[in-house]
Image (cartoon, rainbow, N blue to C red):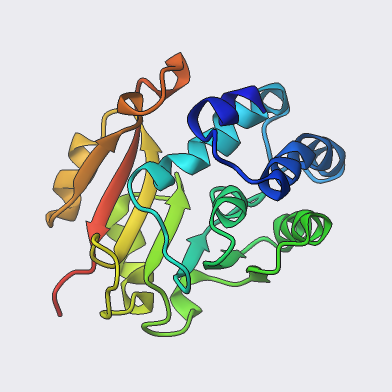
Amino acid sequence: MDILLKYFPNLTERQRGQFAQLEELYGFWNAQINVISRKDIATLYERHVLHSLGIAQVVQFKPGTTVLDVGTGGGFPGIPLAILFPQAHFHLIDSIGKKIKVVQEVTDALQLANVVAEKARAEHVERAAYEFVVSRAVTRLAPFMDWVRHGISPNSFHELKNGVLCLKGGDLTDEIQEYGKRVDTFDLADYFQEEFFETKKVLYVPLPSR
């Protein structure tokens, strides 16, 4: 928890309590259904929770924002973001049912009323239903945008235009060139001091013009 409070010192008591529960919840569920690398459980708050909150360094979701988390796995980045932004709405989807079971159990334990977890594919989500789509290392940007662009609403009410926010790492030059349209890159090392974040980035892709 100390690493979260280092960067997010203004958490409410409820948020602190919810974040504090994550270690026990993921320790329990991951032993039954592997959704996080076993070696990463020890660094859950740095490599999963704080990493997810890197998106909050790029945009602050306003009340009423609807966010789709595609390929959420065990609930990242969606669950940490849902804790941080309790007045935004989060739809967490994954094509693997056992992962969604973990997400649902964690969501229920935390009493996150702003989260819906569903076994679903991005291609089948409702058209123009979301201000933002988020993901963490799901696939290359070009095919990902083909999956999700129909789900993004054209009606923006943030300073950042509606679009996609992807957490990725490493050299992304070829991937960005392959997509061939506007991509803004935010280096998480500019926000977080830990070595883990040296190569980690948030890619922001605004909704392409129709």
Q: Using residue 156 as the reference point, say whether residue 69 is left or right of it.
A: right
Give the quadrant of the N terminus.
Answer: top right
Q: Residue furthest top?
A: 195
Pinpoint residue 203: horizontal percent, then vertical percent. Answer: 29, 46
Q: Position of residue 157 (x, y in %)?
A: 29, 72
Q: Residue at x 27, y 74 (%)?
A: 156
| Residue 78 picture quarter | bottom right
**Residue sitting nearer the eye, 161 or 149:** 161
Residue 10 appears in which quarter of the rendering?
A: top right
> In this rendering, is residue 7 above or below 152?
above
Q: Residue at x 59, y 57 (%)?
A: 82
Residue sitting at the far bottom: 127
State the residue at coordinates (41%, 50%): 139
Left or right: residue 133 versus residue 153 is right
The residue sitting at 26% across, 79% down in the picture is: 154
x and y percentages locating residue 42 in the rendered image: 71, 22
Count of marks placed on residues: 0
Quarter placement of the C terminus = bottom left
Q: Is residue 168 left or right of residue 185?
A: right
Q: Is residue 138 above or below residue 24?
A: below
